[in-house]
Amino acid sequence: MKTKVLIIGAGPSGLLLSLLLKRKNISTIILEKQSSEYVANRIRAGILEPGTVKLLKKAGISNRVTKEGLKHNGFKVAHNNNIFDINLKYLANDCVTVYGQTEVTKDLMNKLTNENVKIIYNVPKINILNIEDKPLVEFDFNKTKESVRADFIVGCDGFHGISKSYIPNNIKKIYKKDYSFGWLGILSDTKPISDELIYINNKNGFALCSMRSKKRSRYYLQCEINENINNWSDDRFWDSLSKALPNDIKNNLQTGPSIEKSIAKLRSYVLEPMSYKKLFLAGDAAHIVPPTGAKGLNLALSDVDKLSSAFISFYEKNSELDLVNYSNVCLSRVWKTQRFSSWMTNIFHNVPKEDNFLKKLKHIEMENLLFSIHAKKILANNYLGKY
């Protein structure tokens, strides 16, 4: 097989890159380790920046996000049993859209199926050869050896993928931080407690009241890093969440059976550079942010926007400039996003073994955020992806 761009990973990053290139008649093949059913049903993020929504419109898959996505003009912060509004529309003249990553993935999969783009699922072992000149990718499929010759390879295969391992150790530099707490999350077919997200900071730590639709809720509680999910019944979760809520909204909480329950470990991670020879990385393959700022998917699709434009410039104008600059351009936004996500994670969580001095500083920081219009404007613009 031959193609211009071989994409490893059929998550939203790989799928969107393929679609954007398809619209410019640039051929792609996608290889995915998991099954299509697994990819379509992965529970992930649900907050889209305005720039991400514009990108989905550019790709021609905005019908459902426009009709079914929930536009939020702001969110709420609960602190010391009080609730404060962060009005994004007033502070930064824009809004976010609540629309699950699973739905974005399904929209992309359906569009690419209609476009007859070749996606090969259930590919467990992949080997990349000749990365410096004429890349060749070998893989096992249905117990046979297959190969694809491509001009370029793009790794959209996430944090645990193999693509980044092909950047030599003497070339790449890794920055990482593992947080000493996690998120216990639950998904339920219950009416959301509020019409906007509520970020909660109290003596027990962090909690988040989120949603996927007007009838489906997503809630999180801060938990210990080594917490056992089997110790958390639905009743225990709902009881703990209720205790974390401000008194004014406790009675609004609607409970029900969980559809999905999981524990997420929080980490910050950046790999530099995001390209090497004929290999390019996008999304979680190159960077991870803690979920507090709702940035993971948005940052990944921003990579794809820049990389697709660079490939289009190469094939239509015979210019390599944007490909050469891809890593530096993306990393500029990546580090701004890391700064914001790390700040928001730090200020909203209770860090184990944190001394009283740092706790007091964080309290002052939160007070400044909630009572300073200047601080709120900075938060609003960062939350919207306007750095």
Image (tube, rainbow, N blue to C red):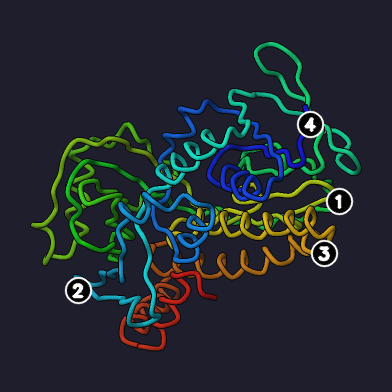
Determine which residue is flagged by label 4.
Answer: 2
- The residue type indicated by label 4 comes to Lys
Residue 383 placement (x, y as % from top left): 44, 70
Q: Earlier in the sequence, mark 3 or mark 4?
A: 4
Residue wearing tag 3: 321
Q: Nearer the viewer, residue 128 or 268?
A: 128
Q: Indicate the secondary structure of the residue bearing disc 4.
A: strand
CA–CA distance in space, label 1 to label 2:
51 Å
Who's the residue at 79% across and 53% down the image? 315
Q: Is residue 155 above or below residue 292?
A: above
**Residue for badge 2:** 82
- The tag earlier along the polypeptide, 1 or 3, is 1
Specify few, some or many for label 3: CA neighbours under 10 Å numbering under 14, 14-19, or 20 or more: few
User: Quick one: quadrant of the N terminus?
Assistant: top right
Give the residue pinned by disc 1.
170
Closer to the camera in the image, 366 or 253: 253
Which mark is first along the chain, 2 or 1? 2
Q: Amino acid at mark 3?
A: Leu
Q: Is residue 1 left or right of residue 220?
A: right
- Looking at the rendered structure, the secondary structure element under dot 2 is strand
In front: mark 3 or mark 2?
Answer: 3
Residue at point 17% right, 65% down? 246
Q: Position of residue 236 (x, y in %)?
A: 20, 41
Q: Residue furthest right?
A: 133
Distance (Cα) linking label 3 and label 4? 24 Å
**Between marks 1 and 3, how big is the CA–CA gap?**
24 Å
Q: 141 or 182, which is in the foreground?
A: 141
